Amino acid sequence: MVERNRAVFRALQESIMKLACSNVLLRCEDGLEFARQKNGLFDVIFLDPPFQSDYLPKLLPLLADKLTQDGMVYVESGEVFEPDEAWQVVRHAKAGAVHYQLLKFEGALKA
């Protein structure tokens, strides 16, 4: 998990300890900076950026080579998010004010 806000980071730390989640790694840094680093491959990447931010269009291009072959990205946003043609929308729906989607990378970076 990556969270830049110190107060939210501390709350997440407390929740991880209370739930005894030994397989959760929490980092206090900017999500874009984390995505630019080499951090291995992921089966699922969950994105829940601040709804008024422009993070999603900036993050998605950085994530294509971070996914395993069948990896997917789960996205939450305050408005309908239209990914570029490199991403296939596997599922989308809305719950209250939250739009959520499950995306699979189908672009040229994957063989």
Image (tube, grey):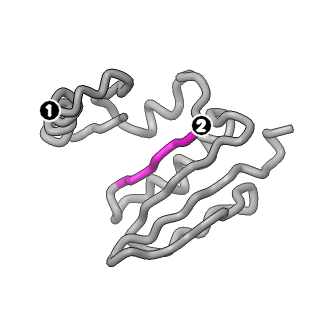
Tell me if 61 is positioned left or right of 70 in this view.
left
Residue occupying the point 62% across, 63% down = 83
Residue at disc 1, secondary structure: helix
Tell me if 23 is positioned left or right of 56 in this view.
left
| Count of labels in the image | 2
Residue 46 within the magenta-colored segment of the rendering: yes
Residue at disc 2, secondary structure: strand
Residue 29 within the magenta-colored segment of the rendering: no
Disc ID at residue 43 = 2
x%, y% of residue 17? Answer: 18, 27
Residue at the farthest right position? 111
Residue occupying the point 74% across, 62% down = 85
Q: Amino acid at mark 1?
A: Glu
Using the image, determine if residue 70 lies above or below residue 42.
below
x%, y% of residue 29? Answer: 32, 31
Q: Say which quadrant the N terminus sits in.
A: top left
The reply to whether discs 2 and 1 touch (Cβ–Cβ < 8 Å) is no
Q: Which residues are magenta?
A: 44-49
- In primary-sequence order, the first of circles 2 and 1 is 1
Classify residue 99 by image quadrant. bottom left
x%, y% of residue 94? Answer: 44, 75
Label 1, on which residue? 14
- How packed is label 1: few (under 14 Cα within 10 Å), some, or many (20 or more)? few
106 or 6: nearer the eye? Answer: 106
Q: Amino acid at mark 2?
A: Asp
Classify residue 31 by image quadrant. top left
Q: How far is the residue under mark 2 from the one under mark 1?
A: 25 Å
Q: Say which quadrant the C terminus sits in.
A: top right
* Main secondary structure type of the part rendered in magenta: strand
Using the image, determine if residue 111 lies above or below residue 81.
above
Tell me if 26 is positioned left or right of 101 in this view.
left
